[in-house]
Amino acid sequence: MTGLSIAIAGCGPAGLTAALLLDGQGHSVVIYDQFDDPGPVGSGLMIQPSGLAVLNALGLAEQTLARGARVDSLEGIEESGKVVLDAPYRALGVPGAFGIGIHRASLFGVLYEAACARGITVETGHRVTGSDLTSSGRRLTFDARQPSPEFDLVVDASGWQTLFDDTPKGVLEFGALWASLPAQPSDPFAGNILEQRYRRAAQMVGVLPIGTRKGQGSPEVAFFWSLRRADYAAWADAPLDAWKEDVLALWPETRILLDRIKSRDQLTFARYAHRTLKRPVAARMIAIGDAWHSASPQLGQGANMALLDAWSLSRGLSEGRTLEEKLRLAISWRRDHVWLYQWVTRLFTPLYQSQTLWHPALRDHFLAPASKVWPASKIQAQLMSGLFGFPLAPLGLAMPDYEALSAAAKASRS
């Protein structure tokens, strides 16, 4: 069974990566998205070694690094000054390993430009409302538009708010305020570390280097502040300077960034959900990325899991005999890794975002000291890098050559 017609709902990392891979296999792919003009939503994210393995296999790792920022470690410090998170990538034992902080617009640009170069069709202005299964295929339905043609397969890559699943979305108590801000060489931040400060687990402020967007001359950082959904309305009504004072009380060095926030319009409130679709496969349909499984951003795995799902789908379509078997294989290679990270994320999130006192106490007095000792230090590095559970080998993926990537990045800057 070759040359399938495939509709992809959603033009995010999952949908674009799936489109590139499936188009490369000779399938006819059309992406549908509700936006009027192609573009991303959000600020910064982390490309972990797990996700970079997929981008490397696509030949896009160098471009991604060129637009992002190399991140060598994650560091979290409690209000008292105690280091409670110290997670360097070197603990993986992989020569030169690192993560990449990148603006969502930059990652979108790398994938979207590659899709355009391949001539992949992107239908904008199509708000998907559902799908209909026919005797010979499946078609998408839209708001105020005629249904799509019939397709052999529909891929739901529309994110955690997918309309194909009507079960409760599991929206989490904590969200975050995000802003993308210009970075200066004199800023008091490491530049190659994701830095966070905590007040117990009720408040968190962080700074992530995210590189330089295409067409912009200066690098940026993503600034984020955790905020309960229930408190967002009060935050929106309070003076902006009052909120800045709360941030400064936790991390005084952020003043230089807060001074660059002139209005609330620079800040976006992001919500998160923890959910797993019990049946990610239906007749002529499969869910990938956040449409299948979503979680809090504490382990930074959202985009990376989506990239792995897209790769698994392409491999399943190439190896299965019937369409049903192809989809079953695609899910089977990812199911254990997805389950593992959903469980681990649910376990770890309250340590960094919750109203309780005992969660941060457990983090600070037991887990933080233990993580400095092998093998806990390596396990921590595997968790943050997306490699816990060994997801690459079953998919036929290999770790990137980090030393070659670093050399290429240096050469491009010289």
Image (cartoon, grey):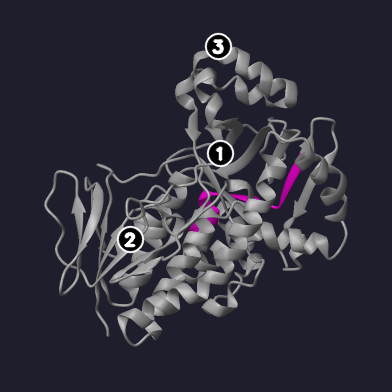
Say which mark, if any, is on residue 239. Answer: 3
Q: Can residue 194 be seen in the rendering of this structure?
A: no
Which secondary structure lies at badge 3? Answer: loop
Q: Which of the two residues, 225 or 326, is positioned nearer the viewer here?
A: 326
Q: Report the disc number at residue 330.
A: none
Specify start and end residues of the magenta stretch as a single range: 63-76
For marks 2 and 3, the one nearer the N-term is 2
Q: Residue 409 appears at what percent x and percent y?
A: 58, 57
The residues bearing labels 1 and 3 have C-alpha atoms spaced at a distance of 29 Å
Camera-near label (2 vs 1) is 2
Amino acid at the residue labelled 2: Ala
- The correct choice, above or below, for 163 with respect to 92 in the image is above
- Whether residue 79 is situated above or below residue 285 in the rendered picture: above
Alpha carbon distance from label 2 to label 3: 44 Å
> Where's the N terminus, which quadrant?
bottom left
Q: Residue furthest left?
A: 146
Q: For the residue labelled by badge 2, is the local secondary structure a helix, a strand or a loop?
A: helix
Is residue 64 found inside the magenta-colored segment of the image?
A: yes
42 lies above or below 228: below
- Which of discs 2 and 3 lies nearer the camera? The answer is 3
Q: Which residue is mark 1?
A: 219
Q: Residue 152 at x, y = what percent?
A: 23, 73
**Left or right of 293 in this view: 23:** left
Q: Looking at the rendered structure, which numbered label has been put on residue 115?
A: 2
Q: Quadrant of residue 400?
A: bottom right
Q: Which residue corresponds to the image point at 68% horizontal and 43% vertical from the top-left?
A: 350
Could you tell me which residue is drawn at 65 percent across and 70 percent down?
Answer: 389
Q: Nearer the viewer, residue 402 or 357?
A: 357
Asked if one can make out residue 89 in the rendered structure from this viewpoint, the answer is: yes
